[in-house]
Amino acid sequence: MSMVDEPLYPIAVLIDELKNDDIQLRLNSIRRLSIIARALGEERTRKELIPFLSENNDDDDEVLLAMAEELGVFIPYVGGVEHAHVLLPPLETLSSVEETCVREKAVDSLCRIGSQMRENDLVDHFIPLAKRLSAGEWFTARVSACGIFHIAYPSASDMVKTELRSIYSQLCQDDMPMVRRAAATNLGKFAATIESAHLKTDIMSMFEDLTQDDQDSVRLLAVEGCAALGKLLEPQDCVTHILPVIVNFSQDKSWRVRYMVANQLYELCEAVGPEPTRTDLVPAYVRLLRDNEAEVRIAAAGKVTKFCRILNPELAIQHILPCVKELSSDSSQHVRSALASVIMGMAPVLGKDATIEHLLPIFLSLLKDEFPDVRLNIISKLDQVNQVIGIDLLSQSLLPAIVELAEDRHWRVRLAIIEYIPLLASQLGVGFFDDKLGALCMQWLQDKVHSIREAAANNLKRLAEEFGPEWAMQHIVPQVLEMINNPHYLYRMTILHAVSLLAPVMGSEITCSKLLPVVITASKDRVPNIKFNVAKMMQSLIPIVDQSVVEKMIRPCLVELSEDPDVDVRFFANQALQSIDNVMMSS
């Protein structure tokens, strides 16, 4: 068989697979459409494959979704952008199917193809497609139509543009809520392509229709449109058209709409400018912070720092801080958690004095919250406050709370504290650290939770790096080595892990004189887990110590372990011995 004919056999198979009863075969075939198209060539792909796909009435959503995705990148296989319009018919069919994800992918592919098409092809093929979908009998076609207007509109003639604006206006008033939702979702994209003269008239009237819709699912999507339209309009038009809508939405009877306003409000502040923000949007935001629905308060609390950055500190202290104090003792733990995750960012905005006077008491109350996530969120952002008020004040006011949290009953809180300790140590300095936190670091090595013990070992390594080997030799190594005789083997394992992490930081001399003898003693432990961890550790010590020490102390110990009754101990001991031989050969 010649080289030219070779691809044709699999192509025939792939096309047969497209008609097969087995869904997996059909799916595989769709995913390899580009291979079929390359083998058929551009002309046959246009004349045979694409019409075949248009007529393919597969009823499986997974196959249709794959087809919609593949067709979006098919322009090179049909002969480039001059022939891109041949891809529109199968995608038009897919844009009207019942399954939402298939329609969305078909609309994505239509937009991708439309954005590459030549202007005359858009006029001849794409705009008529948008009109057909808009007039579709079944609502699914009309939903899809809303997503392609922003591609069709720019290349249309003035007369057709007027018609397209009129069609979109009808879609905004469609009988089906799903169509109105799609129109609200895509209004911002469509508005971005429209001339400013028509923006204030046609688009704003569509927007007003959507904001007064009786379905809250349509109104909440209109809220998203507020931010998009706000960026397109001049600030004074924004104040006239958008601001009243937002103020009304902040008092909407549906909590979902108020939730969306709480999420979007700080973007709208940027659009309308400082003066309207102070007079109209601050009262609206305060209402949302005191909303009777917890979900709305969560959304509003999560934006409190961003909102304060837009205002000057005086306004924030006067209007926002009283609400923040109320939220810090909110009945919903999720509201307190949302507040705790952002409240530290308020410190740089308010400045040192206001932080000390107003925010520190709130931080302290949140640090003592009964819900662990609230405490965690505060701990993880302490450095933001440190930059504002300085370490002395931070240590006096917050450190007692941190020490208390170090023994928290929730292990995740203890873990967060441990991970924060090296940063705290570098900020506090060595003297303060030794007095207040040194004992805690040792205590964690004997925690009941493995993750805490592991984090504590890593913590010691990071502290040794921060304060240097001499400090570690005085304050860490003796205490760690004392614990190697703990009666419980899991604690002995933690100490070995800590030793292996400290060795590279401490250097060859201390490792040989202090750490290695302890490891060799541990190799005679009665528990196999300890022994094979010793073997793994010795392998990691080989590059750190001198070759003479390896031969004199490490190799004899590993030879002994390689004859251990336990199979795992023998395996790791032999692996370490192999590693020694490799080092010797390379040197």
Image: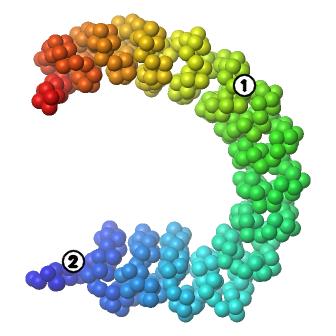
The answer, for residue 578, to whether it is visible in the render is no
Left or right: 218 in relation to 154: right
Q: Position of residue 315 (x, y in %)?
A: 86, 43
Q: Position of residue 266 (x, y in %)?
A: 75, 53
Residue at the image point whose x is 69% and y is 35% from the top: 344
Residue 480 vs residue 283, the one in the foreground? 480
Q: Which residue is label 2 attached to?
A: 10
Q: Residue furthest left?
A: 1
Q: Residue at x 40, y 78 (%)?
A: 74
On-image quarter of the N terminus: bottom left
Q: Neighbour class for label 1 at 10 Å: few (<14), some, many (≥20)?
A: some
Mark 1 element type: helix
Q: Residue at x 18, y 22 (%)?
A: 573
Locate the C terminus by quadrant.
top left
- In the rendered image, residue 163, in percent from the top left (x then y), is placed at 70, 89
Residue under pointer 1: 364
Element under disc 2: helix
Numbered-mark total: 2
Question: To which quarter of the image does residue 357 belong?
Answer: top right
Instruction: Identify residue type, mark 2.
Output: Pro
Q: Amino acid at mark 1?
A: Leu
The mark that comes first in sequence, 2 or 1, is 2
* Residue 194 position (above or below residue 527): below
